[in-house]
Image (tube, grey):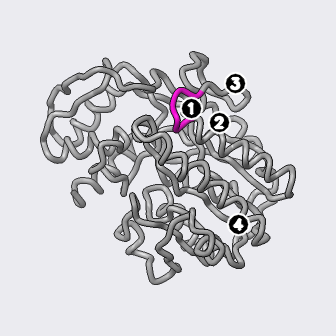
Amino acid sequence: MAVEIKKALITGGAGFIGSHIAEALVTSGCQVTILDNLASGHLENIAAFSNRITFIKGDIRDDTILMQACNACDVIFHQAAIVSVTKTVDEPVSSAEVNDLGTLKVLDAARRSNVRRVVLASSSAVYGDDPQLPKVESMTAKPLSPYAVQKLTNELYAAIYHRLYGLETVCLRYFNVYGPRQDPSSPYSGVISIFMQHAVGKSTPVIYGDGQQTRDFVFVKDVAQANLQSAANDNAPGHIYNVGTSDSLSVNDLWYKIARLAEFEQNPEYADARPADIVHSLAGIQKARDRMGFQPTVPFSEGLAETFTWYRDNT
C-alpha cells in the first residue's frame, strides 16, 4: 500500500539526483524543503520550481540547521554526500566527515524529529570487484575505496536506527546514474557527463583503462521514481535495494554512441586505470521490483538523447 508524502526534506536537493527528486515531489503536490550547502549543487538545478519549494543553504553537519529543516517532515531523502570515489581516495578523512558523520546526524535528527522514513542514497560501489553478475543485495560487500566503505557504513547505521529506534529506513544502491543537470565541470563527474562535454565541445575524451569495462547506466528520472516509491511503499522499509536497469554497456561503446549524437566521429585517448575503479557492473533489480514495484521505464537511447540535448543547450 502506498502512503502519501505530505512534506519532505531533501539533503543535497540542489544536486544532480536531488533536484530530480525535488521536481518529482513538487509535481506530485508534496511540500518540499531542500537543504544544500552548494558545495557541488547548483541553484540553477532547482530554478524552474524554486517558487514552489523552501530552500535552506546549510550543511548537514550543522545540528541547528538540520533540525530546522527536518521540522514536520514525513520523509527525508538523504542525497548530500561527497559522491566521487576518486575524491574519497584523495581525501579519506574529510570525505568521511560528510559521508559518515553527516549521515549519522541526518538519521539522528530524523529520530528526534519523529520523521517517519529516511531514504538514503547508497552505491553499487559496495560490491567491489566481486566477479558475480548481476550484483544482488545478498552478496557480501567488498568495498575497495573509502567511498564504498562510507556508503556501507551508512547502510549499517540505517539498519541500526531501524531496529533500535523504529525509524523506517530504506537504502538505495545506485548504479551509474546519468541525465540532465549532471555537472561535467568536475574531474570527479560521471563518465556520461564528461563524454557529453567532450562531444559537444568537439574535443577528444580520455578513457581510463582499456574501455572494455562495463556499467549499468540508469536514467535519473527512473532513480527519482525509485526514491518516491521507497518513501511511499509499506513494503520498502528495513531493506537495501539496487537501482539500475539490469543491462550494461562498455565505456568504449558509450563514447561512440555519444559521438554519433554529436556527429563527432573521434577516437578516444587512453590512460592508466584509476585506483579502485571496478571493471564490470550490472544490477539485479528483482528485489526492488518485487517489494516496491520499481521498473525503469526510460530506454537508454531515449535517455541518452535527452541528456545530449540538455548538454548541447546548457554547456
> Does label 1 or label 4 sit earlier along the sequence?
4
Q: Nearer the viewer, mark 2 or mark 3?
A: 3
In 3D space, how far apart are the residues under numbered discs 4 and 2 (Cα atoms)? 30 Å
User: Given contact means CB atoms under 8 Å apart, are the residues at marks 2 and 1 in contact?
Assistant: yes
Which label belongs to residue 246?
A: 1
Q: Residue shown at 34%/69% (left/top)? A: 44
Query: Which residue in the protein does label 4 denote?
Result: 109
Label 3 CA crowd tier, 10 Å (few <14, some 14–19, many 20+): few
> Does label 3 or label 1 sit earlier along the sequence?
3
Disc 2 residue type (three-letter): Ile
Disc 1 residue type (three-letter): Ser
In 3D space, how far apart are the residues under numbered discs 1 and 4 (Cα atoms)? 35 Å
Query: Which residue in the protein does label 3 denote?
Result: 140
* Boundaries of the magenta span: 143-148
User: In this picture, is 232 found above or below 51?
Assistant: above
Q: Residue shown at 42%/70% (left/top)? A: 46
Q: Secondary structure at mark 4?
A: helix
In 3D space, how far apart are the residues under numbered discs 4 and 3 (Cα atoms)? 30 Å
